[in-house]
Image: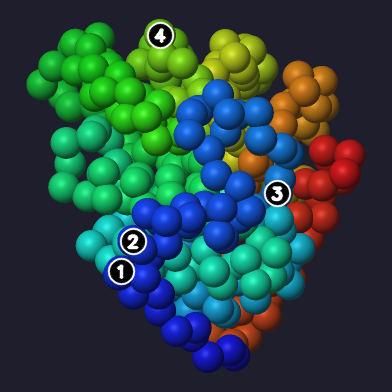
Amino acid sequence: MMTEIKSLTRRTFLKGASTAGIASAVLGAGHSTGAQAAEKSVLKFGGFTKTFQSLGLNYEETAEAAAEVGWDGIECPVRPEGHVLPERVEDDLPRMVEALGKRKLELLIMATAIRNPDEQYTERILRTASKLGIRYYRCGWWQYRDDAAIQDQLAEIKPQLRDLAQLNKELGMCGLYQNHSGRNMVGAAVWDVYEIIRDLDPRYLASHFDIGHATVEGGLSWRTQYRLIQSHIGAVIVKDFTWECTPGKGGTVDWCLLGKGMVSAEFFTMLKKSGYQAPITQHFEYPIPGDSKAEQLKNHIRDLKEDNRVLRALMGT
């Protein structure tokens, strides 16, 4: 395993940002508006590195593992208990970006808990990310309460996302709302994701469309859900599953490697035909076999390589 790189101090980071622009220094190009950033979007493949964090990998080791899998970049947890902590974002996010850059990889998407501009760390995280040239971040999510009507709760969420989209426009970034499956999840039906973002410019606040969760919740209607949200998709998440059924009690989701389950290859055909050009990140919730962390990491990278191979074949790259 590699030794963790020397941290960029906050003073060094701010000095670089105020002079030449940290995005230009690290990525070779900056941006000032969402429209300009959107023009630079290209189809890139990556993966969510929450599992690398759980296996104890530091920033250098995470970048090394991502390169071994064959990704173009990563989706990095930048949130409480994440790989980059919100209170340390000015110091640690540049370190992660630098570790990736050494291997010609990008931080494609941040996975955050951000839901509105007024939260404690929202501006610190987003302004730091913008200076580093990071374009996309996944927002936090909501759950429905039992004490209010669904439509009233959606009406409460809308202005928070509207204000967040305005901040994103200023910073040249795009917030992404992921559709999860499960009881009381805002977005499980996808129709409610569309309801809360339909009036927003998708350059600044868009859908993080998860075909795995959409298929869990939509069954055969995932095509309709995709068509509904297509104009507002900012990035795509892929994972696969099978159903485990108990007669009389319903079914449970058993997550599996991509191409081994219920997610239809037709989705990727539709995505290609749409001209989609933005990040696609692999998520994985299937078990990681092994009796030690070293063995688990070896097996996990093996499985991620297979997911990456299948995904690229489905997208024709």
Q: Give the structural element (helix, strand or loop) at label 2.
A: helix
Percent from the top left, x then y, of residue 181? Answer: 45, 35
- Name the kind of residue labelled 4 in the image: Asp
Residue in the image at 32% along x and 30% along y: 167
* Distance of label 1 from label 3 (alpha carbons): 30 Å
What label does residue 45 carry, if any?
3
Query: Which numbered dot is residue 31?
Result: none
| Disc 1: which residue | 10
Q: Is 145 left, or right, of 72 in this rendering?
A: left
Residue shown at 13% from the left, 16% from the top: 148
Q: Which residue is mark 2?
A: 14
First in sequence: mark 1 or mark 3? Answer: 1
Q: CA distance from mark 2 to mark 1?
A: 6 Å
Mark 4, residue position? 199
Left or right, residue 313 beside residue 189: right
Q: CA distance from mark 3 to mark 4?
A: 29 Å
